[in-house]
Image: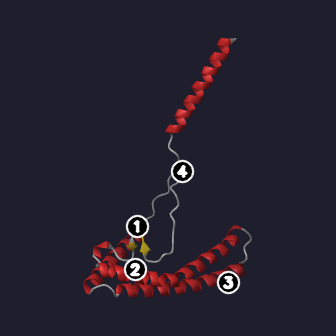
């Protein structure tokens, strides 16, 4: 009787040990953490996301850009918050009962906010662009033209074929 219990205990421990080792060596399929998207316009990572490093901005230009972006944050933040609020108000209509009239009213409000955001963003870009020297402005235009060309080429590429199942 003792030998049967001992064999059963050893078999159980072996299965448990094998399961633990197997589980510890399998890769987890957890997705990477979601990117936090903030609407701090123009401020990416360490500062001047609007301008590439290749423009070689001076310390004075960096300081001016930072001051402008800090000043404009008070204008942009309420617009981003309003846009986010409207998105939250639209969500129940996508997931629940659809009311076209209410969705259209919210979409019209969202359009007004987007217009104001576009105007403010363009004004800020212009203000920042004016801080650049003539050479830096020419370089920036060249960089932007190259970026537009790359984007256009990507748009013309055929879509990848769907994987067969």
Query: Would you place residue 134 above or below residue 19 in this image?
Result: below
Count every numbered label the image shows and give the total. 4
Q: Closest to the observer: 101 or 86?
A: 86
Q: Nearer the viewer, mark 4 or mark 3?
A: 4
Mark 4 to mark 1: distance in Å?
A: 31 Å
Q: Closest to the observer: 44 or 153?
A: 44
Task: Write down the residue under mark 3.
Answer: 105
Label 3 crowd (10 A; few <14 / some 14-19 / many >=20): few
Element type where label 2 sits in the image? helix
The answer to which image quadrant residue 145 occupies is bottom left
Mark 3 to mark 1: distance in Å?
A: 37 Å
Element type where label 1 sits in the image? loop
Task: Write down the residue under mark 1.
Answer: 157
Residues under numbered marks 4 and 2 in contact, where contact means CB atoms less than 8 Å apart? no
Residues under numbered marks 4 and 3 in contact, where contact means CB atoms less than 8 Å apart? no
Mark 2 to mark 1: distance in Å?
A: 38 Å
Task: Write down the residue under mark 2.
Answer: 66
Q: Earlier in the sequence, mark 2 or mark 1?
A: 2
Task: Write down the residue under mark 4.
Answer: 30
Label 1 crowd (10 A; few <14 / some 14-19 / many >=20): few
**Whole-percent x, y for residue 105 in the image:** 67, 83
The answer to which image quadrant residue 14 occupies is top right
Mark 4 to mark 2: distance in Å?
A: 37 Å
Mark 4 to mark 3: distance in Å?
A: 39 Å
Q: Nearer the viewer, mark 3 or mark 2?
A: 2
Residues under numbered marks 2 and 1 in contact, where contact means CB atoms less than 8 Å apart? no
Q: Earlier in the sequence, mark 4 or mark 3?
A: 4
């Amino acid at each position: 009787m003792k030998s049967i219990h001992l064999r059963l205990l050893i078999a159980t421990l072996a299965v448990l040990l094998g399961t633990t080792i197997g589980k510890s060596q399998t890769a987890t399929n957890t997705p990477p953490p979601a990117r936090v998207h903030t609407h701090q316009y123009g401020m990416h990572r360490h500062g001047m996301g609007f301008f590439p490093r290749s423009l070689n901005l001076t310390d004075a230009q960096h300081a001016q850009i930072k001051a402008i972006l800090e000043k404009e944050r008070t204008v942009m933040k309420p617009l981003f918050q309003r846009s986010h609020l409207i998105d939250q108000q639209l969500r129940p209509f996508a997931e629940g009962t659809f009311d076209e009239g209410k969705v259209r009213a919210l979409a019209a409000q969202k359009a007004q906010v987007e217009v104001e955001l576009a105007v403010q963003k363009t004004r800020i870009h212009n203000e920042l662009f004016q801080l650049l020297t003539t050479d830096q402005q020419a370089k920036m235009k060249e960089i932007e033209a190259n970026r537009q060309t790359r984007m256009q080429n990507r748009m013309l590429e055929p879509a990848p074929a769907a994987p067969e199942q």
